[in-house]
Amino acid sequence: MHALAAKHTPPVLPVPADDAEAAAIFALPAAERERVASLHSAFGALPARPDDRRRALARLAAGDLAPLGLSATRLRILFGQWRRDGWAALARRYKGGTARVNTTFMQWFAALHERCQRERTGATAWSLFRRQYERWLGGDATAAIPGLGAMPPPPHGRERVPAGHGYRNLMRHLSHFSPMDATLAKRGRHKAREALPPVLHTRAALLPGQMYFVDDSWHNSYVIHPESLQAVRVLELVYLDVATTRRTLFGLMPRLTAEDGKSLAFVAKDMLCLTVAHLRQNGWHPDGCVIPMEGGTACLSEAVVERILHVTSGKVRFVRMGADRVSAFLGDYAGAAKSNPRRKALLEGSFAFTQRRLSWVPGQTGGNARLDKPEGLDARLTQERQLLSIERRLDADLAADLPHHFPTLEQYHALVDETYAEIDGRTEHNIEGWVQHNWLAPALPGMSHTAFAALPAPAQQAFLASLAQSGQPIPMRRLSPAEVWRQHAPGLRHLPLRAVPFLLGPEFSRKRTVSQEHIFTAGGRKYLAQLPTQDGTHHYMLHPGQSYMTCLNPFEPQFLHVLDGRGEWLGVCPAWERADYADPAASVGAMATQNAILGEARSRVSFRAQDAMAQRLHAAESVNARALTQLKRLLPADEVARRQHTAPKPPAATTDATDADVEDMLSQTAPESVPTQDTPADGDDDALPWQ
C-alpha cells in the first residue's frame, strides 16, 4: 500500500527563493501547477546526449506523459523553452518568460508609454525601449533600464530583446494597467474624469428660486451688427432657474472685433450687472438660494459675494464649482482653468436644446464649427463682408435692398425672445419634479390652457363643475415652466432698489449734471430729473445745473440711481422716452407728467409768495374801500333811477350808488386771492419736502 501510494503521488515544483517567482508558481491553478510539475520533473531526468534525449522524449510522449496529449515534437519544443526560461515556459499560454518581467521594469515601461501622447497601443513605447536597450548593450551606462539588473541581459529571439520582454508579452502586461492612468498622464485630470462614474443629481425636490445656474455660451449663428457693419457670432450670459428650467434673465452680446484687433466678450463687470438685475427682478426663495458659479466669465469676486450675502441676510449664497488649474501629479505643469461640464449638465443641455430650436435661422455655424461647419459658410462670410463694405458707400434706400445672408442683431434678438417664450410656454414636456409637486392642471377639451387661464375664477370653477357632473373624466396636463414660475413668483424675495449702487460699487458711479430741461443724460438715454419724497406721496425736481453722483445698471436701463455727495441713495429717476405718434396714450402720459411738474412748481411758488400776496391783497382792499365811498357820490342820479327801474331794489334804496354797483365796476381790478398759511393750495403743504 505504501509503495502504491508513492507511485501515484503527483510531482511538486520546488519552491524558488525569489518571492516573485514563488508567488507566480502558487498563482497557477492546481491542475496547471501539477501539469507543469510533471513536465519539469520529466525534463530534469532526460539524458544529456541529443540523440538519447530525442528517443527519451518519444518514450515519454507515448508513456508517462501521454495523458497530457503532447506529441514528441511538442515535447522537444517545450524542452527547449524550459532549458532557456525555466519552469515558467511550461505553463500553457506562455508568451516568452512571463515570470521574468518584474514590477520595477513594468512601471518604467508604463511611464514610457504614458509619455507617448498620441499612442494607444504601446508600440511606440516598445520601440523606444528597444532603442534604449541597444544603447545599453553598446556600452552607454546612462541608458540602463530599471528592473533588468546592473548589466544588460543578453538579447534573445528574433526581436533581440531580453527573454520575456517581447512585444506581445509587454503589451499583455501593459493591459493590466488602468486606461485612466494613461489618460490622466496624456490628457490631464479633466479628460480622466470622463472615465469616472457620473455623479447623478435630481431637481425633483427644488422649488422655483432655490437654485440658479449662470453661465455664458456661444450661439451657433452669425448676425450683422449694424453700427460696425460686421458679421459676427453672438454670446449669451444667462441665469437659469433649476426647478423650472426657465431662463429668468439673459443678455446677448455680438462678438465684435475692436480697432486693436481684440475681440469683445463678456467680462466680470457684465456678470455683476446681470446678477444684480436678476436678484432685483426675479428674486430668491425665502428659505434660501444657491447659485453655483465657475471661475471664468460667469464669476464674481469674493468681495461682491460677501456684499450680496450681507444684503440678502445670508439667503443668497454663491458656490464655486470645480474650475481649477491643478496639475495631474506633483511636479507637472498646471493646465488651463476649466470646469467639469458634467456638473452643470442641465445648463449645457438647455444650451443645446435652445440652439436646436434656433437652428433654422440663416448663418448657422454648426454645433462644433471645427467638425460640422457647413461647407458654404466661409463663402457666405466672404460675400457678406463684401456686401457690408459696399453698403458703407451706398445710399440708405439702396443699401436696404442688398441681399444679406444673415439677420441683423435686432432681428436675431427678436427671434431669440420669441423662441425662449415658446420654450417656457410649452406644456408637452417631461421635466422631473412636476408630478411630485403636483404642477398639473386640467386639460380641457376644446379649450386651450391660455384661454382657460384667462377666465375668471368663478367661471373656471363652474366649467369644471359642469364637466364633473357630466361624468366625463378630466384629463390632466403638465403646467408650462412659465405657469409654474408665475405661481411662485409672488412669494420670492427681491433686492431693493437702494441696494443696487451698493452692490455695483463706485466703478459704476458717474457725476452727472441736470440740464436746463430737468434731464439727466446717461448711456445715450434721457432720464427725468425727478425724485420721490421719502414717503413716496410726492415728487420733486432736481435743480438745473446741480451735479449728482448717479449709477446706471446696463441690464436695467429704465432706472438711473441718484446719490448725494456723501453717497447716500436719494432715489431713481425714470427714463424719459420718446412718445410714438402711433401711441396717443404715450403722448398724453408725457404731457400729464409735464403738467404735474408745473403744478408742483406753482404750489411751491405760491407758498413762498403768500406773504407778499397777502400784503398786496390788503392794500387793494383798503384802496377799494376808499374808492367805494367816493364813487357812490359821483354816480349820476338818472343812472341810479334807471337801475332801480330795471332791477327793483328793497324799499330802503337811496339815490346813492350801492355797494353792489361799485363791486361790479371794481371786479376787474381786484387781484386773485392767494393761499395763506391756513389754506394751502394744491394739497396739504405738510407733505412737501421743503418745509
Image (cartoon, rainbow, N blue to C red):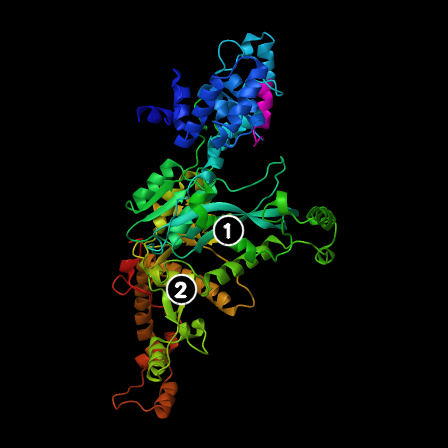
Q: Which residue is mark 1?
A: 351
Residue beneath the point at 48% across and 67% down: 588
Under circle 2, the secondary element is helix
Q: Is residue 564 visible?
A: no
Instruction: Give the tally of numbered discs.
Output: 2
First along the sequence among labels 2 and 1: 1
Q: Give the position of the N terminus as an image quadrant.
A: top left
* Front residue of 564 and 608: 564
Taking the image as shown, residue 492 lies to the left or right of residue 325, namely left
Bounds of the magenta span? 119-130
Amino acid found under the numbered disc labelled 2:
Glu
Q: Is residue 35 left or right of residue 685?
A: right
Identify whether 622 is placed above or below 609: below
Disc 2: CA contacts within 10 A as few (<14), some (14-19) or many (>=20): some
Residue at disc 1, secondary structure: helix
Q: Residues within 10 Å of mark 1 (few under 14, many from 20)?
A: some
Give the foreground label among 2 and 1.
1
Horizontal and vertical percent position of residue 633: 33, 78
| Most frequent secondary structure within the magenta stretch | helix
Q: Which mark is residue 483?
A: 2
Q: Is residue 47 above or below residue 31?
A: above
Marks 2/1: CA–CA distance: 21 Å
Q: Is residue 178 left or right of residue 622?
A: right
Instruction: Check disc 1 and give the amino acid type.
Output: Phe
Q: Nearer the viewer, residue 345 or 663?
A: 345
